[in-house]
Image: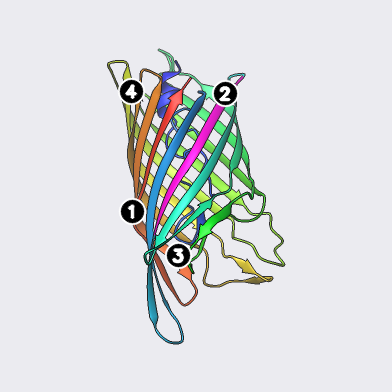
Amino acid sequence: MKKYLLIGALLFTIPNFACDTCSGSVGLVDNGAFQLERNYVGVVWSFLSQRSNYTTFESEIQNKIRIHQVGLMAGFNFKEKYNISVAVPSYVAYSKGLNSFSLGDPLINFRYRIYKNAASPLKPASHILYGNFGLKIPFGVFVNQSLNQIDNINFSTKTVDFVLGAQYIYTKKNKGINLSFNSRLNTSDKSKNSIGHGFVLRTLLFANKDFNKSTLSLFAGLSGEYNLKEISNGYTLPFSGGKALYLTLGGNLNVNNFISVMINPELPLVQDYHIQNGTIFTNLRINLNTKILF
């Protein structure tokens, strides 16, 4: 077992960006966290809520939305350095006593291990660098929709998007740091309508503990995200896009190299999301996933 690689590869290797929203990039489908060089199948549940306030010609309106995501994911490693993974999300949104169900855009991702310096008695620290390239396919669709409005939430970008990123992991004596950068690049015609590009940068500190054929990994850090403004009929929408900084906490339990369970809350520290004639505020985001390793 590649112990340090297994337990040092932390949260959200590739954000899915299947639900692009001004209240967050919503990269909630975990696409290989903690198992960068393992085969796995799994399921993820995520939750977020947001509150939007905006003014119409007649009155001020406040709208509260709760979103549950359930996603299926699988990853397959081959020739040590290569990995391909797939994530397929679905969403249920609640607002004003109504609900909406949708299928999100699936993501196919390819990851390559660029560099690895394994730990040794003379060099106790290890360094690992990954690069990734993915495609988000515009298959997302509303199966049923009873909501008249879901403020600034798009369960599909309606275009093929590129997902590009990199990840660096430093580990020494069961502790370390994880740095990751990911981007979603929209390929839509800028003279028509498009959702802005999205970017996520994370810095996480982690510590690992082995006991009874199990490994517990705890982590904490910061996650910053930046979403560019949307375009409608060739014009940039001034009240769109946004940025935020989140406090990221969590833990992952690996049992006998067979079952992996992770929980991760994210608390917004600073946020500046935009909406026409108003504001959006995101509350706590929670993610829970379970994988079978083989």
**In the rendered image, which quarter contains the N terminus?**
top left
- Residue at horizontal 42%, vertical 14%? 122
- Give the amino acid type for the residue marked by disc 3 in the picture: Tyr
Crowd tier of the residue under label 1, counting other residues whose Cα lies within 10 Å: few below 14, some 14–19, many 20 or above: some
Please tell me which of labels 2 and 4 falls first in the chain.
Answer: 2
- Residue at horizontal 72%, vertical 61%? 189
Instruction: Residue 77: say if magenta.
Output: yes
Please tell me which of labels 3 and 1 falls first in the chain.
Answer: 3
- Residue 144 vs residue 263: left or right? right
- Give the amino acid type for the residue marked by disc 1 in the picture: Leu
The span from disc 3 to disc 2 (Cα, nearest Å) is 38 Å
Q: Relative to the observer, which residue lies in front, 208 or 281?
A: 281
Give the magenta part as a residue range.
66-78
When the figure is inspected, residue 83 is found, relative to residue 241, above or below; the finding is above
Checking the image for residue 205, the label placed there is none
Residue wearing tag 3: 273
Q: Main secondary structure of the magenta part?
A: strand
Q: Are marks 3 and 1 in contact (CB under 8 Å)?
A: no
- Residue 115 vs residue 125: left or right? right
Residue wearing tag 1: 284
- Give the amino acid type for the residue marked by disc 2 in the picture: Asn
Crowd tier of the residue under label 3, counting other residues whose Cα lies within 10 Å: few below 14, some 14–19, many 20 or above: many
| Front disc: 3 or 1 | 1
Name, please, the residue furthest toward the left.
Answer: 211
Callout 4 secondary element: strand
Q: Position of residue 19 (x, y in %)?
A: 51, 53
Residue wearing tag 2: 77
Please tell me which of labels 1 and 2 falls first in the chain.
Answer: 2
Please tell me which of labels 3 and 2 falls first in the chain.
Answer: 2
Residue wearing tag 4: 215
